[in-house]
Image: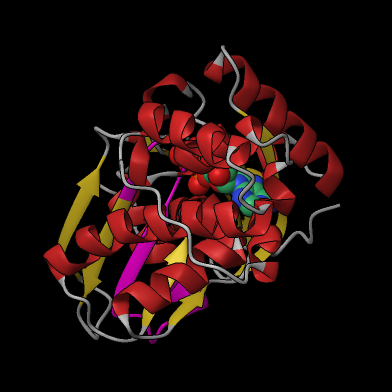
Amino acid sequence: MNRSDATLTLGVDLGSTAIKAVLLADGMTVKACRVALTGHNARQSAEQLVAALLDEAGVTPDQVARTVATGYGRLYYDPADREVSEITCHARGTRLVMPQARTIVDIGGQDSKVISLADTGRVLDFAMNDKCAAGTGRFLEVMSRALDVPIEQFGRLAEASTKDVAISTTCTVFAESEVVGLVARGEALPDIVAAIHRSIAARIAALVRRVGPAAPVVSTGGVAQNPAAIAALATELDQPVEVAPDPQFTGAIGAALVAAADHAEPRP
Ligand code: ADP
Protein backbone atom coordinates (compact mmCIF):
# COMPACT_ATOMS: atom_id res chain seq x y z
CA MET A 1 0.00 0.00 0.00
CA ASN A 2 1.02 3.58 -0.58
CA ARG A 3 2.09 5.47 2.54
CA SER A 4 -0.80 7.87 2.81
CA ASP A 5 1.50 10.90 3.11
CA ALA A 6 3.64 10.12 0.01
CA THR A 7 2.75 11.94 -3.21
CA LEU A 8 2.99 9.51 -6.12
CA THR A 9 3.56 10.64 -9.69
CA LEU A 10 3.96 8.63 -12.85
CA GLY A 11 6.29 9.20 -15.81
CA VAL A 12 5.67 7.25 -19.02
CA ASP A 13 8.27 7.37 -21.81
CA LEU A 14 6.77 6.00 -25.03
CA GLY A 15 9.91 5.37 -27.08
CA SER A 16 9.88 4.02 -30.62
CA THR A 17 11.54 0.80 -29.42
CA ALA A 18 10.67 0.51 -25.72
CA ILE A 19 8.14 1.97 -23.30
CA LYS A 20 9.38 2.84 -19.84
CA ALA A 21 7.26 3.72 -16.80
CA VAL A 22 8.44 5.07 -13.44
CA LEU A 23 6.45 5.61 -10.26
CA LEU A 24 8.04 8.35 -8.17
CA ALA A 25 7.38 9.11 -4.49
CA ASP A 26 7.53 12.72 -3.30
CA GLY A 27 9.33 13.90 -6.43
CA MET A 28 12.56 12.18 -5.49
CA THR A 29 12.44 8.41 -4.86
CA VAL A 30 11.83 5.81 -7.55
CA LYS A 31 9.26 3.45 -6.04
CA ALA A 32 8.90 1.14 -9.06
CA CYS A 33 9.93 1.03 -12.71
CA ARG A 34 9.17 -1.22 -15.66
CA VAL A 35 10.09 -1.51 -19.35
CA ALA A 36 8.47 -3.36 -22.29
CA LEU A 37 8.90 -3.38 -26.04
CA THR A 38 6.65 -0.86 -27.79
CA GLY A 39 5.46 -3.32 -30.43
CA HIS A 40 2.81 -2.39 -32.98
CA ASN A 41 0.34 -0.77 -30.60
CA ALA A 42 2.09 1.82 -28.40
CA ARG A 43 -1.15 2.86 -26.72
CA GLN A 44 -2.02 -0.67 -25.62
CA SER A 45 1.57 -1.53 -24.63
CA ALA A 46 1.76 1.61 -22.44
CA GLU A 47 -1.54 0.91 -20.75
CA GLN A 48 -0.56 -2.70 -20.00
CA LEU A 49 2.86 -1.64 -18.73
CA VAL A 50 1.43 0.98 -16.37
CA ALA A 51 -1.22 -1.44 -15.07
CA ALA A 52 1.51 -4.01 -14.31
CA LEU A 53 3.70 -1.36 -12.66
CA LEU A 54 0.93 -0.10 -10.37
CA ASP A 55 -0.09 -3.66 -9.54
CA GLU A 56 3.49 -4.54 -8.61
CA ALA A 57 3.75 -1.43 -6.42
CA GLY A 58 0.37 -2.11 -4.74
CA VAL A 59 -0.97 1.23 -5.92
CA THR A 60 -4.36 1.98 -7.47
CA PRO A 61 -4.63 4.50 -10.36
CA ASP A 62 -6.51 7.00 -8.17
CA GLN A 63 -3.54 7.12 -5.77
CA VAL A 64 -1.37 8.62 -8.55
CA ALA A 65 -1.48 12.40 -8.19
CA ARG A 66 -0.36 13.22 -11.73
CA THR A 67 0.99 11.57 -14.87
CA VAL A 68 3.26 13.00 -17.56
CA ALA A 69 4.02 11.27 -20.87
CA THR A 70 7.15 11.80 -22.96
CA GLY A 71 8.92 10.15 -25.89
CA TYR A 72 8.16 9.72 -29.55
CA GLY A 73 4.67 8.27 -28.88
CA ARG A 74 3.72 10.58 -26.00
CA LEU A 75 0.49 11.73 -27.68
CA TYR A 76 -0.81 8.15 -27.65
CA TYR A 77 -1.01 7.85 -23.88
CA ASP A 78 -4.48 9.26 -23.14
CA PRO A 79 -4.40 8.94 -19.31
CA ALA A 80 -1.52 11.47 -19.13
CA ASP A 81 -2.31 14.89 -17.66
CA ARG A 82 0.30 16.44 -19.94
CA GLU A 83 2.94 15.61 -22.59
CA VAL A 84 6.47 16.96 -22.27
CA SER A 85 9.42 16.77 -24.70
CA GLU A 86 12.14 14.17 -24.30
CA ILE A 87 14.77 16.91 -24.12
CA THR A 88 13.16 18.39 -20.99
CA CYS A 89 12.57 14.96 -19.44
CA HIS A 90 16.13 13.69 -20.02
CA ALA A 91 17.50 16.95 -18.61
CA ARG A 92 15.27 16.70 -15.51
CA GLY A 93 15.90 12.99 -14.99
CA THR A 94 19.66 13.34 -15.33
CA ARG A 95 19.67 16.33 -12.98
CA LEU A 96 18.12 14.11 -10.27
CA VAL A 97 20.49 11.17 -10.63
CA MET A 98 23.70 12.94 -11.77
CA PRO A 99 23.43 16.65 -10.98
CA GLN A 100 27.01 17.29 -12.09
CA ALA A 101 26.23 16.41 -15.77
CA ARG A 102 26.91 19.16 -18.33
CA THR A 103 26.38 17.11 -21.49
CA ILE A 104 23.79 14.35 -21.85
CA VAL A 105 24.10 11.80 -24.65
CA ASP A 106 20.80 9.93 -24.95
CA ILE A 107 21.09 7.01 -27.35
CA GLY A 108 17.72 5.43 -27.97
CA GLY A 109 16.31 2.83 -30.30
CA GLN A 110 15.67 5.06 -33.31
CA ASP A 111 17.11 8.43 -32.42
CA SER A 112 19.96 9.98 -30.47
CA LYS A 113 20.08 13.35 -28.75
CA VAL A 114 22.81 15.42 -27.18
CA ILE A 115 21.80 18.02 -24.60
CA SER A 116 24.03 20.72 -23.23
CA LEU A 117 23.19 21.86 -19.66
CA ALA A 118 24.05 24.94 -17.63
CA ASP A 119 25.32 24.31 -14.09
CA THR A 120 21.77 25.12 -12.92
CA GLY A 121 20.46 22.21 -15.01
CA ARG A 122 18.84 24.51 -17.59
CA VAL A 123 18.95 23.27 -21.20
CA LEU A 124 21.37 25.47 -23.17
CA ASP A 125 21.34 23.66 -26.50
CA PHE A 126 20.63 20.30 -28.08
CA ALA A 127 21.23 18.32 -31.25
CA MET A 128 19.24 15.39 -32.51
CA ASN A 129 19.61 12.57 -35.03
CA ASP A 130 16.25 11.08 -35.91
CA LYS A 131 16.81 10.67 -39.64
CA CYS A 132 19.41 7.95 -39.86
CA ALA A 133 19.63 4.60 -38.01
CA ALA A 134 23.44 4.58 -38.10
CA GLY A 135 23.93 6.52 -34.86
CA THR A 136 21.15 4.81 -32.89
CA GLY A 137 20.36 1.56 -31.10
CA ARG A 138 18.72 0.36 -34.31
CA PHE A 139 22.17 0.02 -35.91
CA LEU A 140 23.32 -2.25 -33.07
CA GLU A 141 20.09 -4.25 -33.19
CA VAL A 142 20.41 -4.88 -36.95
CA MET A 143 24.03 -5.97 -36.50
CA SER A 144 23.37 -8.17 -33.46
CA ARG A 145 20.60 -9.89 -35.40
CA ALA A 146 22.84 -10.34 -38.47
CA LEU A 147 25.48 -11.95 -36.24
CA ASP A 148 22.89 -13.89 -34.22
CA VAL A 149 23.95 -12.50 -30.83
CA PRO A 150 21.36 -11.19 -28.30
CA ILE A 151 21.58 -7.38 -27.92
CA GLU A 152 22.17 -7.74 -24.15
CA GLN A 153 25.40 -9.67 -24.82
CA PHE A 154 26.49 -7.89 -27.97
CA GLY A 155 28.77 -5.24 -26.42
CA ARG A 156 30.61 -7.73 -24.19
CA LEU A 157 31.81 -9.62 -27.26
CA ALA A 158 33.93 -6.65 -28.28
CA GLU A 159 36.08 -7.04 -25.15
CA ALA A 160 37.99 -9.98 -26.70
CA SER A 161 38.92 -8.00 -29.82
CA THR A 162 42.63 -8.14 -30.70
CA LYS A 163 42.69 -6.66 -34.19
CA ASP A 164 41.30 -3.53 -35.84
CA VAL A 165 39.04 -4.28 -38.77
CA ALA A 166 37.25 -1.45 -40.54
CA ILE A 167 33.67 -0.89 -41.60
CA SER A 168 33.90 1.71 -44.33
CA THR A 169 30.23 2.56 -44.90
CA THR A 170 28.05 4.34 -42.35
CA CYS A 171 24.69 3.39 -43.88
CA THR A 172 23.03 0.66 -41.79
CA VAL A 173 21.87 -1.31 -44.82
CA PHE A 174 25.27 -1.33 -46.56
CA ALA A 175 27.11 -1.83 -43.26
CA GLU A 176 25.06 -4.98 -42.65
CA SER A 177 26.26 -6.41 -46.00
CA GLU A 178 29.81 -5.37 -45.15
CA VAL A 179 29.59 -7.19 -41.80
CA VAL A 180 28.33 -10.33 -43.53
CA GLY A 181 31.32 -9.98 -45.90
CA LEU A 182 33.74 -9.71 -42.94
CA VAL A 183 32.32 -12.93 -41.49
CA ALA A 184 32.75 -14.65 -44.88
CA ARG A 185 36.35 -13.38 -45.04
CA GLY A 186 37.02 -15.16 -41.73
CA GLU A 187 37.46 -12.11 -39.51
CA ALA A 188 37.00 -12.94 -35.80
CA LEU A 189 33.59 -12.11 -34.30
CA PRO A 190 34.98 -9.91 -31.45
CA ASP A 191 36.94 -7.83 -34.01
CA ILE A 192 33.83 -7.33 -36.16
CA VAL A 193 31.72 -6.41 -33.12
CA ALA A 194 34.36 -3.91 -31.96
CA ALA A 195 34.35 -2.33 -35.46
CA ILE A 196 30.55 -2.02 -35.32
CA HIS A 197 30.78 -0.17 -31.98
CA ARG A 198 33.52 2.14 -33.31
CA SER A 199 31.27 2.94 -36.25
CA ILE A 200 28.24 3.93 -34.13
CA ALA A 201 30.51 5.84 -31.72
CA ALA A 202 31.92 7.93 -34.59
CA ARG A 203 28.40 8.95 -35.63
CA ILE A 204 27.35 9.85 -32.10
CA ALA A 205 30.60 11.73 -31.41
CA ALA A 206 29.92 13.94 -34.45
CA LEU A 207 26.52 14.80 -32.92
CA VAL A 208 28.13 15.47 -29.52
CA ARG A 209 30.64 17.88 -31.08
CA ARG A 210 27.75 19.94 -32.48
CA VAL A 211 26.83 21.09 -28.96
CA GLY A 212 29.93 20.66 -26.85
CA PRO A 213 31.02 18.56 -25.21
CA ALA A 214 31.37 20.11 -21.77
CA ALA A 215 32.44 17.63 -19.06
CA PRO A 216 31.11 15.63 -17.36
CA VAL A 217 29.45 13.81 -20.24
CA VAL A 218 26.69 11.45 -19.07
CA SER A 219 24.98 8.84 -21.24
CA THR A 220 21.31 7.90 -20.92
CA GLY A 221 18.91 5.76 -22.97
CA GLY A 222 18.88 2.04 -23.66
CA VAL A 223 22.22 1.95 -25.48
CA ALA A 224 23.99 3.29 -22.38
CA GLN A 225 23.57 -0.27 -21.07
CA ASN A 226 26.00 -1.42 -23.74
CA PRO A 227 29.52 -1.03 -22.29
CA ALA A 228 31.26 -1.33 -25.67
CA ALA A 229 29.21 1.52 -27.16
CA ILE A 230 30.06 3.82 -24.24
CA ALA A 231 33.76 2.84 -24.19
CA ALA A 232 34.00 3.45 -27.97
CA LEU A 233 32.29 6.84 -27.56
CA ALA A 234 34.74 7.84 -24.79
CA THR A 235 37.67 6.84 -27.02
CA GLU A 236 36.21 8.76 -29.97
CA LEU A 237 35.60 11.90 -27.83
CA ASP A 238 38.89 11.43 -25.96
CA GLN A 239 37.14 12.13 -22.67
CA PRO A 240 35.32 10.04 -20.04
CA VAL A 241 31.64 9.21 -20.58
CA GLU A 242 29.73 8.30 -17.42
CA VAL A 243 26.58 6.19 -17.44
CA ALA A 244 23.47 7.33 -15.56
CA PRO A 245 22.11 4.73 -13.11
CA ASP A 246 19.39 2.63 -14.85
CA PRO A 247 19.97 4.79 -17.95
CA GLN A 248 16.98 3.53 -19.97
CA PHE A 249 14.63 5.05 -17.35
CA THR A 250 16.09 8.58 -17.30
CA GLY A 251 13.40 10.08 -19.55
CA ALA A 252 10.56 8.43 -17.58
CA ILE A 253 12.12 9.63 -14.30
CA GLY A 254 12.21 13.14 -15.76
CA ALA A 255 8.55 12.87 -16.77
CA ALA A 256 7.59 11.76 -13.24
CA LEU A 257 9.59 14.71 -11.85
CA VAL A 258 7.73 17.15 -14.10
CA ALA A 259 4.48 15.57 -12.89
CA ALA A 260 5.58 16.10 -9.28
CA ALA A 261 6.46 19.75 -9.97
CA ASP A 262 3.10 20.29 -11.72
CA HIS A 263 1.30 18.75 -8.74
CA ALA A 264 3.17 20.95 -6.25
CA GLU A 265 2.51 24.06 -8.30
CA PRO A 266 -0.47 23.51 -10.61
CA ARG A 267 -0.17 25.20 -13.99
CA PRO A 268 -2.76 27.87 -14.77
P1 ADP B 1 13.57 4.44 -27.30
O1 ADP B 1 13.28 5.35 -26.10
O2 ADP B 1 13.97 5.21 -28.53
O3 ADP B 1 12.49 3.44 -27.55
P2 ADP B 1 15.55 3.19 -25.57
O4 ADP B 1 16.22 4.35 -24.92
O5 ADP B 1 14.59 2.41 -24.76
O6 ADP B 1 14.88 3.62 -26.95
O7 ADP B 1 16.71 2.23 -26.12
C1 ADP B 1 16.45 1.11 -26.93
C2 ADP B 1 17.81 0.56 -27.38
O8 ADP B 1 18.54 0.17 -26.23
C3 ADP B 1 17.72 -0.68 -28.25
O9 ADP B 1 17.73 -0.32 -29.61
C4 ADP B 1 18.98 -1.46 -27.89
O10 ADP B 1 20.02 -1.14 -28.79
C5 ADP B 1 19.38 -0.92 -26.54
N1 ADP B 1 19.24 -1.88 -25.43
C6 ADP B 1 18.10 -2.18 -24.76
N2 ADP B 1 18.33 -3.06 -23.77
C7 ADP B 1 19.67 -3.31 -23.80
C8 ADP B 1 20.55 -4.12 -23.01
N3 ADP B 1 20.10 -4.86 -21.99
N4 ADP B 1 21.87 -4.11 -23.33
C9 ADP B 1 22.32 -3.36 -24.35
N5 ADP B 1 21.56 -2.58 -25.11
C10 ADP B 1 20.25 -2.55 -24.85
The front one of 140 and 148 is: 148
- Can you tell me which quadrant of the image ligand 1 is in? top right
Q: Nearer the viewer, residue 110 or 78?
A: 110
Q: Please identify the quadrant where the C terminus is shown.
A: top left
Front residue of 182/251: it is 182
Relative to 149, 168 lies left or right: left
Q: Looking at the picture, how far across and down is residue 203, in whole percent?
A: 29, 54
Q: Is residue 97 magenta?
A: yes
Horizontal side of 258 relative to 27 (left or right) equals left
Q: For the point 67% across and 51% down, which residue is it?
A: 189
Does the magenta run of residues contain 54?
Answer: no
- Tell me where residue 127 appears, x and y as whole percent: 18, 54
What segment carries the magenta color?
A: 94-112
Residue 119, percent across and down? 24, 86
* Residue 88 in view: yes
Q: Please give the name of the residue rendered at 22% of the width and 58% of the height, measured from the top-left corner.
A: 207
Question: Which quarter of the picture shows residue 162?
Answer: bottom right
Q: Residue at x 64, y 45 (%)?
A: 186
Q: How is the image coloured?
A: secondary structure
Residue placed furthest toward the top: 40
User: x, y percentage for residue 100?
Assistant: 38, 87
Residue 66 can be seen in this image: no
Q: How many marks?
A: 0
Residue at 37% across / 29% down in the picture? Answer: 174
- Between 85 and 188, the residue placed more toward the observer is 188
